[in-house]
Amino acid sequence: MSDREGDPAGMNDQADTPFISVVIPTLNREKELCDILCYFLNEEEYPSFEIVVIDQSEHHTGTTTTYLQSIADRIIRRTVSYKNLPKARNEGVALAQGSIIVFVDDDAMPQKGFLHAHAAPYDDASVAGVTGPVVAPQGKLVSRADIGERAYGRLLARTEMTFDVDFTFICSWAAGGNMSFRKEVIVALGGFDEQLIGPAIGEDAEFSHRVKKSGRSIVYNPAARIIHKQAITGGTRSGKEGIYIRNYAFNVNYFFWKVDRTWWQRYYEVSKAYRSRVANKRNALTGRWLVLTFFFLWGVLKSDMLISGLVRQAGTTRVSGGAIAGA
């Protein structure tokens, strides 16, 4: 299939609205993928946008394949052989023509006014990114009074983050399933970090960390709301438990190095992750903790080796950036 067949949806650019590229990385999702594409093609009211799908799936059902063929001239779809979320984001950015890139999960359902809500904060030149609520199907937004003054203060201080409140604030990081950035910012910062593997835990927060270090802000806009369907099949979390635990440990260790934690802070976070994911009551009762410990330590060792190599290569204790080819 051609990457650009016909005119992408919403190419009727308007002088008073920035052109937006909606990038949807997908992996082995069927109805959920069709549903979100149907939303953007038939319900989204923003006048000037395109849809870019980076499809990492091995195959699709006949129903999904038929639907994708029926809309081939209305979206940009690239099929790839790898399974790497940050790499898929970077490939989407390289294909995108918009000045603003909106990333959404393939099992999300945006709510009315979604793209308008993402575009509005960019009227402020200091804003580099926007995020919004990510709520479960029956979830509701909570008010400032509901969360209390202490929690509100932590949000403003950017020491904590939540994605279920009904007020605007400058936030600490953007949720990967519902976030946007100026394309120029993504390219300038080197894109998303493709070293993060499997479920790529922390890839959104790691990129947000680099945005903040550059002196730009990320805005939480409650109107940019999605419902997260939390599909139980598909996605990068699929596969054998041991491999998932290995990748999880790798990402936790590497992430905390990338966000400038000291070695002892990093290993404190790694130990917390071990107690949570491996040395818990369920695994103790089933006897799984021992074999999962092996996989966890394997992941930590792999990431330590990567970190050491990057430090030697760069001659520094920090390496920034990801990889955008052709952006």
Image: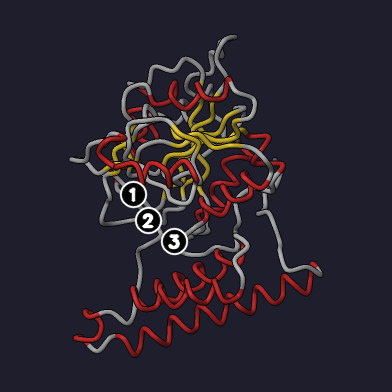
> Is label 2 or label 3 in front?
3
Question: Which mark lies nearer to you, 1 or 3?
Answer: 3
Q: Position of residue 133 (x, y in %)?
A: 35, 37
- Give the CA distance from mark 1 to mark 3: 15 Å
Q: Which residue is mark 3?
A: 199
The C terminus is located in which quarter? top right
How crowded pointer 2 is (Cα within 10 Å; few <14, some 14-19, many 20+) is rated as many
Amino acid type at image mark 1: Arg
Q: Residue furthest right?
A: 315
Pointer 1 residue: 29
Res 60 visible: yes
The answer to whether marks 1 and 2 mark residues whose Cβ atoms lie closer than 8 Å is yes
Judged left or right of residue 298, residue 243 is left
The spot of residue 317 in percent (x, y) is 73, 68
Q: Give the residue drawn at x 27%, y 51%.
A: 231
Nearer-N-terminus badge (2/3): 3
The residue drawn where x is 48% and y is 60% is: 200
Please report contact status of discs 2 and 3: CB closer than 8 Å, yes or no: yes
Q: Nearer the viewer, residue 21 or 5?
A: 21
CA distance separating discs 1 and 2? 7 Å
Residue shown at 29% from the left, 42% from the top: 147
Amino acid, disc 2: Gly
Say the numbered circle drawn on residue 235.
2
